[in-house]
């Protein structure tokens, strides 16, 4: 069972889940790319190509089935459970959790 870990004691710059993902892509690309171009979770999902959980690699994006939440797939824990990094108002932090309600996984077209 994957445990939840707090990465940051606050929401970075007041960002929600999609803002956090945009912020990560902006920073790892030295300001050259924002996935979804600021349009939220639905737009981020449109800038991805669907994949399967079995083919998932670190950096893929994970989505709730209704595209209301997004996170970043970080890999698998020692028990074979998914590790997801996301900004969660429920936890009031940037956190590492298990798969929870994330249903879809996709490869960002940035890669």
Image (cartoon, rainbow, N blue to C red):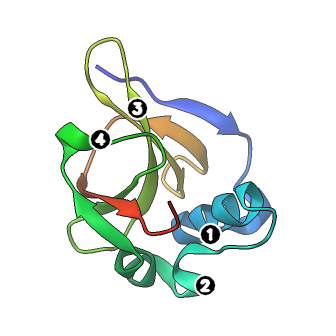
Nearer to me, 7 or 26:
26
Judge whether 84 appears above or below 92 on screen: above
At x 43%, y 76%, the residue is: 41
The label number, if any, that marks residue 6 in the structure image: none
- Name the residue tied to disc 3: 75
Q: Is residue 58 left or right of residue 105?
A: right
What crowding class fits label 3: few (fewer than 14 Cα within 10 Å), some (14-19), or many (20 or more)? some
- Name the residue tied to disc 1: 22
Rounded to the nearest angstrom, the CA distance separating label 1 from label 4 is 20 Å
Tag 4, which secondary structure? Answer: loop
- Name the residue tied to disc 2: 38
Would you say the residues marked 1 and 2 are in contact, meaning their CB atoms lie under 8 Å apart? yes
Q: Nearer the viewer, mark 3 or mark 4?
A: 3
Residue 71: % across, % down:
45, 55
Q: Nearer the viewer, mark 4 or mark 2?
A: 2
Which of marks 1 and 3 precedes in the sequence?
1
Rounded to the nearest angstrom, the CA distance separating label 4 from label 2 is 24 Å
At x 25%, y 20%, the residue is: 80
Which of marks 2 and 4 precedes in the sequence?
2
What crowding class fits label 2: few (fewer than 14 Cα within 10 Å), some (14-19), or many (20 or more)? some
């Amino acid at each position: 069972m994957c445990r939840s870990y707090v990465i940051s004691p606050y929401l970075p710059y007041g960002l929600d889940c999609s803002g956090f993902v945009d912020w990560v892509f902006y920073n790892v690309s030295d300001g050259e790319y924002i996935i979804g171009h600021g349009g939220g979770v639905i737009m981020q999902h449109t800038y991805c190509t669907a994949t399967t959980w079995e083919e998932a690699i670190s950096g893929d994006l994970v989505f709730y089935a209704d595209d209301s939440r997004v996170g970043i797939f970080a890999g698998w824990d020692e028990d074979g459970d998914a590790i997801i990094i996301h900004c969660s108002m429920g936890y009031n932090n940037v956190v590492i959790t298990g798969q929870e309600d994330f249903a879809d996984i996709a490869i960002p077209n940035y890669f």
